[in-house]
Image: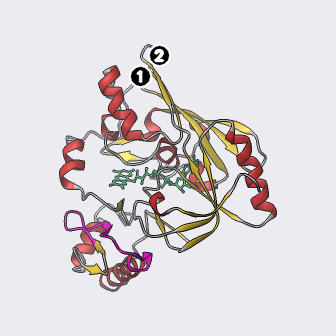
Amino acid sequence: MDYLSYNVDISWLSNYKTPAKARYYFELSDTEDIDKILEIVTWAKENNTKILWVSWGTNMLFAFDTYDGIVIKNSLAWWTYNSDSKILVSYGSEPIWNIAELLEKNYWQALWHRFIWLPGSVAWAVYGNAWCFGLETENNFVSCEVLDLEDGSIKTLYKEDMKFSYRSSILKLEKKYFLITATFDLSKKIEKYHSEVDNIDFRENKQPKWNSCGSFFKNPNKEWSAGYLIEQVWLKWHKIGWAYFSQRHANFLMNDGTWSYRDLLDLVAHAQKLVLDKFDIKLENEVQIIY
Ligand SMILES: Cc1cc2nc3c(=O)[nH]c(=O)nc-3n(C[C@H](O)[C@H](O)[C@H](O)COP(=O)(O)OP(=O)(O)OC[C@H]3O[C@@H](n4cnc5c(N)ncnc54)[C@H](O)[C@@H]3O)c2cc1C
């Protein structure tokens, strides 16, 4: 397969920055590359090779030294906003925080204020129905253009097709679509609930910075947050090697320079065991562990 590079260092592609390589690697940087993706997908099927799609890698822990498959980095980024119709169209890899900030600066459009400093791409925001203090991606979503990886066609999925729910959508459920562009209607403010939290202050001063992928575990229910449970088993600031749970926010698993993903996995397993023993609650990952 001519398009693929071999044995490529991909450590920079996960926010945890643990050393990692990909057996095969392809970067999608031009719309003309979309045809190549189909060839790569067909080749992967014929050769029984798995594929990992990455936009900004802020939601993935690489649990391998070499990924035994193809890593496809999506770098298709560009967006446009029409201030009359208030329609926003963006390619998948565009960082959502960047759009949210520029909408305010350049267009006095503050509807996505909550998304300022939310890490990650538009593709993931749709894939995982990103959520910030009452605002969810689905609120202003109109449609997305996807490549159907099973039949090779380009399709438009509308809101009613998307099966949006808490941190999920059809893209996550069926894993057969590659998001090319997404369209949003920013003419109407729709929030699940109103919140007075200053999200910029929150991101700046209440969340830890550096190498993390945000909240590591899902909150098990409305009463118990994962961070509270981790504190209750005395794991806040607990270290295994260079991996630890942040002092600022106990559900943030951090990497302070560890050379191995194994420290991170050991700490995750340790937290799950202690919480299960003490509270009979099984903590589930929100961050994806990629094997
Ligand atoms: C500090 C911090 C704070 C956070 N706070 C919040 C928060 O408040 N609310 C919230 O909802 N989230 C939060 N998150 C999670 C964050 O929004 C996600 O990590 C981020 O959006 C993932 O985007 P990404 O581009 O890095 O995706 P990646 O990690 O690159 O990919 C994530 C998934 O999307 C799939 N994918 C990527 N591109 C495509 C595509 N084009 N088509 C189909 N599938 C694709 C990948 O295969 C993968 O399964 C936080 C994360 C961090 C690091």
**Which residue is at a point 57% across and 35% down the rendered structure image?**
181
Number of the label disc, if any, that sits on residue 187: 1
Residue 79 shown left or right of residue 214 in the figure: right
Q: Which residues are magenta?
A: 245-263
Three-letter residue code for mark 1: Ser
Q: Nearer the viewer, residue 16 or 97?
A: 16
Depth check, mark 1 against mark 2: the one in front is 2
Q: Nearer the viewer, residue 60 or 167?
A: 60
Residue 45 shown left or right of residue 143 in the figure: right
Q: Which residue is mark 2?
A: 85
**Secondary structure found at label 1:** loop
Question: Which of the marked residues, 1 or 2, is nearer the chain's N terminus?
Answer: 2
Disc 2: residue Cβ within 8 A of ligand 1's nearest atom? no
The reply to whether dot 1 and dot 2 touch (C-beta < 8 Å) is yes
Q: Residues within 10 Å of mark 1 (few under 14, many from 20)?
A: some
**Which residue is at a point 21% across and 48% down the rendered structure image?**
204
Q: Residues within 10 Å of mark 2 (few under 14, many from 20)?
A: few
Q: Is residue 193 magenta?
A: no
Specify the farthest residue to the bottom: 277
Q: x, y percentage for residue 133?
A: 30, 45
Q: Quadrant of the N terminus?
A: bottom right
Residue 271 shown left or right of residue 166 in the figure: left
- Where on the picture, by quarter, is residue 152? top right
Q: Is residue 247 magenta?
A: yes
